[in-house]
Every structure is written in C-alpha cells, then in structure tokens.
Image (cartoon, rainbow, N blue to C red):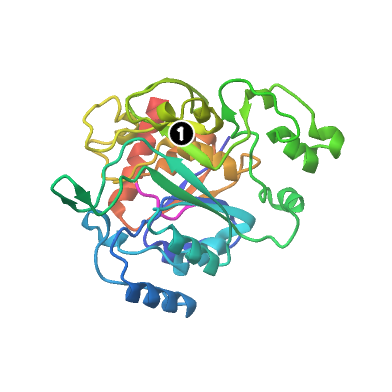
Amino acid sequence: MSFDHLLYTGRAEQILHQIVPGSVLACVTDPPYGLTQYRLDQVRACLQAWLAGKPYCPTGKGFMGRRWDNWIPGPEVWAPVSTTLTPGGYTLAFSSTRTVDLLALALRLSGFTILDQLVWLRGRSWPKGKHLDGRYCTTLKGLVEPIVLAQKPSGQQAVATLQQYQTGMLNVLDTVIRGEAVKTHSNSAEAVLSKGIYGSGKSGATRQNSRQEQGRFPANVVISHNWDCATVQDGGQVVESRCTAGCPALYLGEAASFFAQFQEEPAAFYADPVGNQERNCGLADRNPGLAVKPVALMKWLLQLVVPLGTGVVLDPFLGSGSTLLAGDDLGIPIWGIDADPVMVATAQQRLTGWRELR
C-alpha cells in the first residue's frame, strides 16, 4: 500500500490552519500535560480567556523545568484540530490525572463531544512530589495516565457517518483483547458490527466466526507490563507473561485478561540497550523524549479510531514519533507537528531505524 507521512516543524495552532479542512480521519496525540502549580487565580484567568476565544499563555515552567509544559493546550489548538477532522472523526489525547479536567474542557469548548476516558495502567513510576524524612510526601506515585476519547459531531446517525466518512464508529473487531479464546454472542465485536452495516438485525447478532473467538470486547482500560517482564505477544498484545515485581498484570491476576496488555519500554534512565531498542532505534544518542509511549499501545489506539484501516491520522504533538512508528507499521499516513526541530528530526531518525528493525 502506498502512503506518505508528513512532518511539520512549528507551533500546532499555526500549522493546523494550513491543513485542508476535513482531510484528516482521526487525531491521536500525546500533548503537554501541564504539570505545574495551578493557582485558583490562574485557572480563573484561563477559563476567562478560553471563553473569550483567546489563548491563555502563563509564564512559568512545567515538568522537569520545561516551558512548553507550563499549561494545557487550549481551544486555540483543539478548534483547528476539529476543523481538520472529517465529521465523526475521533481524537485520543493522553493526559495527567491532575490536569485531565482542563484538557476535557478545552476539547468541549472546541466543539468536541467527550465520549470516554481510557485508563492506561502502568507498573513503575516514582512519586514526583516533595519528600520529608522518608515519611511524608505531597503526592502519590502516579501509575495511571488517562486518555481522553473525544469525537467531532457528524450531525447524523453513526452507521450513516461510517458509510459516508469511514469513521464515526470504533473498530472493536481489530482491537479485541487477545488471549484465551472466549465465546461471545450478542456483545461480541462482530455482532455489534453485524447489527449495523454488515448484518440484518437480530439474525446477525449471534453469528460466530473464528475472529470472534480470539478475544474479549475491548475495554477502556489498558495495561503495560514492566519492561523486564518475560512476555509472549500476539499482534503487539501480551498474551502470556512471567511478570516481575510491581507489574499491574501480576497483581490483577485473572482479571488482567479482560484488558489489552502491552510491553512497557524502559524509562530513559535504564541503561539496558536491548530494552531501549524501540526507544532509541535509529538514534546516535539517547532519545530526548521524556514520556515515550510504547509503539504497540499506539498501534492499538490507531486501530481503534481508524475503523476501515485507512485514512490520515493527525498528531499535533509529535514528540519523538511513537505515533509515527505505529502508523508506519499499519500503513496509516501520519501527519505530525512539533514546535521543536530536534524532536521532528528525532522522529524521522526513529522511523528510519524502525524500518530497519522490521
């Protein structure tokens, strides 16, 4: 299949206006989380600016002293994202438990409908607050990252949107939870689709085939195994594992089989060169990205919001390019934007290295 990725260097709110309206099928992105101190007067000023149709541009720094992380991207970004999307198109945006409320509000004010919040459960992290005497801390350890699922309204029924625009319904068949074969009937992914385009009412709702028996209906929880867990994978999903201490799948036990599971990449401070192969592929030095997402997870998310397997996906906060690598694996063109030319170059180099690994 022939497809082209497009990478832009510049601020998302400026580049987005250059994209033809309605030319993008979905948006999958990992925007700044805005991990800074949120004073009440700042939140009020932010809401006043957003409601007046203006950007809110505070001073200060965010995560690890980065200025680009000093606040959540506002409607000045998400409104033009909505414009680029075809009617019914989805947006998946990672966030922080501390700031997801403002992200969801920014999306709402940009015309999106908030459909759900996926939860990405991880096993290893470190408390990022202030510590005192080994007894007190200002925060808990963060093992959860929310992913907001939003949709651009289409003004028509979901089935009609899918037929006209190739979006408007989630691709549950290709994102089933892999593992032990599970017989599913009226709630199966195939059955849900059969009630719409492919079937003829109740007679199609209980139809069984081999694909239905490959796994469970996708849930709004996804799990990352520790990077040093020994795993067996099927289509990028972990189906068998020997888990190390702290892995959420280990403690969930049998319940973990209800959720999509992926292998976590080691954080930048782990030196294992094999474990860091995905993070650093194609790079002469360490990946400068601070929160590199697993490619397998990004592939699953892309499949979820690209129902028919084709169509352009936008990433307005490209970073080091995990969405790009995932799209390349699936044959989905990614249009990526990042204000930092170093990150755009990193994404390009990772893509070259990733293709050599395949």
Disc 1: which residue: 296
Q: Considering the image in quadrants, where does the C terminus appear?
A: top left
At horizontal 21% and vertical 30% (from top left) the residue drawn is 271
Q: Nearer the viewer, residue 344 or 121?
A: 121
Asked if residue 81 is positioned above or below residue 180 in the image, the reply reads below
Instruction: Specify whether 345 is left or right of 323.
Output: left
Give the residues in magenta.
314-319
Q: Give left or right: position of 285 versus 85.
A: left
**Where, by quadrant of the figure, is residue 246 drawn?**
top left
SS under mark 1: helix
Q: Position of residue 53 (x, y in %)?
A: 48, 77
- The spot of residue 70 in percent (x, y) is 30, 63
Q: Main secondary structure of the magenta part?
A: loop
Residue 19 lies in the magenta stretch? no
Q: Is residue 17 above or below residue 26?
A: below
Q: Image check: 236 left or right of 213?
A: left
Label 1 amino acid? Ala
Q: Quadrant of residue 288?
A: top left
Q: Residue at horizontal 63%, vertical 24%?
A: 214
Residue 187: percent from left, percent from top = 71, 36
Q: Where residue 329 sits: x, y (%)?
A: 49, 33
Tell me if I can see residue 279 in this picture: yes
Q: Is residue 15 visible?
A: no
